[in-house]
Structures are given as C-alpha cells and as structure tokens.
Amino acid sequence: MRFLRTLRMPAGFILLLAFSSAHADEPKPTTENTIHVQLPAPVTPQKFARPIHFFVPEVIDRSGNAQPTLVLREKGGVFLDRPPAQIAREAISQSLKAADLLAPDAASAELVLQVYLFHFGLAHGSGLDFFGKVDFAVTVKNLKTGESQQIQASGTSIAGLAVRKKNIQKNVQANIEAALEDAVRNLLRGTQLKEAIAALTKDSASARGVPVLMETAFFAIENRNRQQTLRKLYEEVT
Amino acid sequence: MRFLALALVGLLSLPAAASVKESEPQFKTIEAKHFTRAEGVELSPQFTDYLYAELRSELAKTKMFAQVIGEGEAVEDADAARSLVIEGMITEYKSGNVAKAVIIGFGAGMRSMKINATVKRRSDQVNLASVNVHIKISPRWREEIMAKAAAHDIAGEVKKALKQLAKNP
C-alpha cells in the first residue's frame, strides 16, 4: 500500500511534466514569428477577345485546416498575419485591378469568380527544402444567364532550407509568395479560364443569330428557293 | 596612345558581349505537365505534385528557358515556335526492401523508379527529345528524395538533348 502511495507521486509529476511540455510545444503567434504574404507584383492576365469585368467575392476556405494561419510548427512556429482566404482574394483582385478587369461589385460584373481554397502554405516535401503549394478551384459564373463552369489552378514553389529562425521565416515567406504568384498566374493566364469565358460569354450573334439563319437557309434549300435564300442570307450576314 | 587604349577596351569588351549572348535563353517558355503513372505504380498522391514542382525548379536552373510556365498556361502565338512542352510517365516503381538492402547490399533491395519523358515543340507538337531516367535510392529514404533526384536528372538530360539538337539540327 505504501509502495502504491510512493508510486503515485512521481506518476503524477511525470504526467504534469508531459502535459506542460506538450503545451509549451504549441506555437503562439507573436510579432516576431508572423509574416506578411502578398504578391510581389500583380500578375498580368492573358488578353481576352474583349475586355471583361470580373468580381471576386469572399474566398471560401475548403482546406479543412484547423489553424489556417500556422504555416510552420517547428522552431517556434511561423504564422500568417491574415487568413489565407483573404490573402488569395487580395492577390487575385490586385492582379485584375492592375489590368483594369475588376468590377467594383457583382452587379456591374459580367462574370463572378468564386474561389474555393484547397491548400495554402507549405506541403509535405523531401525535408531538404521548403515546398510551397497553393491550390484553388474557381467557379466562373455568368450572373445574367446563371450558367457556370469550374476551373482549377495551382501554384508550387521550392525554396532552400535555413537554420537560423530569421532565415527560416524569410525563406518560408518567399516560398509562399512564389507559390501564390504561380497559382494566380496559372488561373489568370490559363487556357481553362479562356475556355470558360468563351463558353459563358457567347456573343448573341453567334449564340442565336447565325444558327437561326442557318436553319432558315436549310429549310429554304429544302423548298428549292436556294439562290434567293442564300443571297438573302449573304446580305444579312455581311 | 589613345587609339591603343581604345583598342584594348574594345578587345576586353568582346568576351563580355559574347558571354551575354551565350546567357540568352534558347527557348521562350517550357510548360511542365504533371507526370502520369502507369498501372501498378503505387506512390502517394502528393508525390506527383512534388515531382512537378521540383522539375519546374530544376528546368529553371538550366537557364535554357526564359520562363518555366505551369500546366495549362497560355502562350503568345508569336512565342509558340520557341516554346516547349514536357510531359512524362512514371512507368515503374519499386518500394524496395530494407532487410535486403542491409543484409545483402550491393544495390539489392533499393527503392527504384523509372520515368519516360518527352519534350515537344508547342507550335507543331514535334518531338524534340525523349528522356529515360532510372533512379535508385535507399529504401530508408523518403520517396520525395527520389522525386528530387529524378527531376534533377530529367532536367540535365533535357538540357543535354536540346544542346545536341542545337549543334546538329
């Protein structure tokens, strides 16, 4: 009995020590371990057939990360100063605004880009370097017709490891910024966006006018008024 | 005397001008695509992403391309003739055996991977280079280290093949 009582003391002490050490390992955001991530320069979007204005509403974070601002747990942790969803939205909006393609609100926009963020920050790498990854899916929606299309964009970056805490923060920041820039470029200069825009903003003449004319011509040919109808069609098209 | 000094300056600037010309990238862009996997290749889902990132990083280091663009990015029509696309397939992967590697050694039980990659010209899809890479690492190392080694080898082989092509078009 005395033996059990003597054993209880050290066991409790060990448990307390284990709990306190586990608690101490959990990094907390401070001014020293917080980084500011933004695009180094706005990404120039691809040229579209005609200028289109986009609106980017709040980005939805689908990463399932309980601590989205924590990008690195080791060495006291590295935190982002804003949530990743906000950073992603700012980056896309900033690039569109620089190219004069950003609408101030959804009502004045031709297309709405609803961004879903799936990954933002560091990913599982070789351990010999930092592997930055930004992944998002975008729903391009035409508010007038209600039609939408899904596209995907991703950005990656590799940066060297560092030993000193200050250099780690610097490398992590540069790595995430490069991955973010890559993802925004992949979105705005991607063929997927071009195709989605082409499908969602079909010109009324090409969407309705020409098929109607072709249909008319088809029936007219069936009715053996070929020359007359084709001349009429030619005049209407030209 | 002044003439001599001018001639000397001119002679000294010649190699510098030549090195500037040499450092100009041979191609405008190269688009790296995610490598596909043959049936039976069992690697983690993030492996392909890491290989893609490493490959882009290694291709940028070759200094043969003005820009290494991401998958699915558009290229100006004027640049298409001087733009390339690299795609490939992981044809074989063996996870290795630690016991064999320790007891037998001499390359037995090594973790290995085979990749076939092709480089095509963007404008006409002409095949410019085919690269086959076989990587072997210790089974105790992470598979991402294998991706790093593979990306390094592929970029090196691509550089060699494109330089060879430039010499003998």
Image (cartoon, coloured by chain):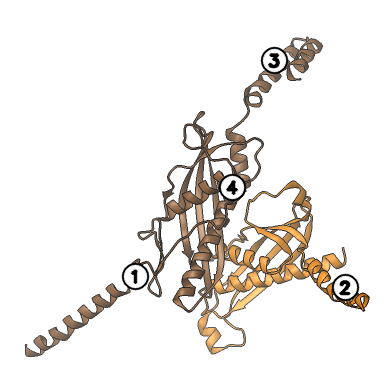
Residue B157 x/y as whole percent: 73, 70
For the residue labelled by badge 3, is the local secondary structure a helix, a strand or a loop? helix
Q: Which numbered circle lies on residue A216?
A: 3
Alpha carbon distance from label 2 to label 1:
61 Å
Q: Does the CB distance between marks 3 and 2 fall below 8 Å?
A: no
Crowding at label 2, few (<14), some or many (≥20) Cα neighbours within 10 Å? few
User: Would residue B74 be found to the left or right of residue B77 on screen?
Assistant: left
The verdict on a common chain for dots 2 and 1 is no
Indicate the amino acid at tag 2.
Gly
Chain letter of the residue beneath label 3 in the structure image: A
The subunit carrying tag 2 is B
Determine the residue positioned at 65% across, 72% down. B152
The tag on residue A188 is 4
Q: Position of residue A124 (x, y in %)?
A: 48, 67
Query: Tag on residue A27?
Result: 1
- In the image, residue B53 above or below residue A20: above
Q: Are marks 4 and 2 on the same chain?
A: no
Asked whether, in this view, residue A27 is left or right of residue A217, the answer is left
Residue A139: tell me if it is visible: yes
* Separation of residues labelled 3 and 2 (CA atoms): 75 Å
